[in-house]
Image: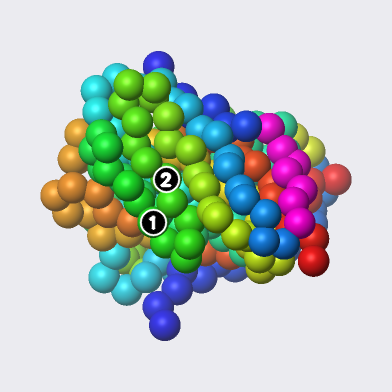
Amino acid sequence: DARVTQTPRHKVTEMGQEVTMRCQPILGHNTVFWYRQTMMQGLELLAYFRNRAPLDDSGMPKDRFSAEMPDATLATLKIQPSEPRDSAVYFCASGFHKAGWNEQFFGPGTRLTVL
Amino acid sequence: GNSVTQMEGPVTLSEEAFLTINCTYTATGYPSLFWYVQYPGEGLQLLLKATKADDKGSNKGFEATYRKETTSFHLEKGSVQVSDSAVYFCALCVGDQGAQKLVFGQGTRLTINP
């Protein structure tokens, strides 16, 4: 049963610290998305990649957030320095792009708390 | 711009009640429409979808019909179960085939009491 995995599942850190979240997409999927979910803003798309190349990162605060795909099996989202307003659940999703719609498969999320 | 508006929750129903969660959208062009469900502590899962006007998506007893004239995609189920308790998200897909993105509504929390 192929699934998107995310680590860590929970992270508590202090303001100013660097945070790295990792995602392993489903094998064979060529598109990876990063979302952030908060009570106030709901679900927001931060960035997404196709074939490891960034297609759109317009939803991501550029000054402190960065997203990369070092290889096809790993996507990372980094926050440096972290701030309390970054507290949220961060979801990774993957899919295989083809003509027409491709379903997005979500991971379980990383719950980040910045004190 | 592109946006999705869902009825505000939380929604609380008794088991076997009829469910409707309203969803309306604003989009340029002809979007595809989706309902995703999020169970406690989990990520979102695709529940159903419709890709063109008058299409009906269905899964697990849930249905939604793509209504272009009213720009709506309301979710319905005839008889809900306790296991349907979750947060439901309406979404649309925009962009050309090279740059498809999902735009989500704010989510509607559903609680079913036995």
Q: Is residue B62 above or below residue A42?
A: below
Crowding at dot 1, Cα within 10 Å, few <14 / some 14-19 / many 20+, comes out as some
Q: Which mark is residue B64?
A: 2
On the picture, is B78 further left or further right than B100? right
Q: Position of residue A106 (x, y in %)?
A: 48, 60
Q: Amino acid at mark 1?
A: Ser
Crowding at dot 2, Cα within 10 Å, few <14 / some 14-19 / many 20+, comes out as many
Q: Residue at 37%, 41% (x, y): give it.
A: B65
Residue furthest to the bottom: A1
Q: Is residue B78 above or below residue A74?
A: above
On the picture, is A61 further left or further right than A1? right
Range drawn in magenta: B8-14
Q: Residue at 61%, 48% (x, y): give it.
A: B19
Choose top left, top right, bottom left or bottom right for residue B5: top right
Tell me, yes or no, if residue B12 can be seen here. Answer: yes
CA separation in Å, label 2 and label 1: 7 Å
Question: Label 1, on which residue?
Answer: B58
The reply to whether label 2 and label 1 mark residues of one chain is yes
Q: Position of residue A22 (x, y in %)?
A: 53, 62
Choose top left, top right, bottom left or bottom right for residue B78: bottom right
Relative to the observer, which residue lies in front, A108 or B56? Answer: B56
Q: Position of residue B57 (x, y in %)?
A: 35, 51
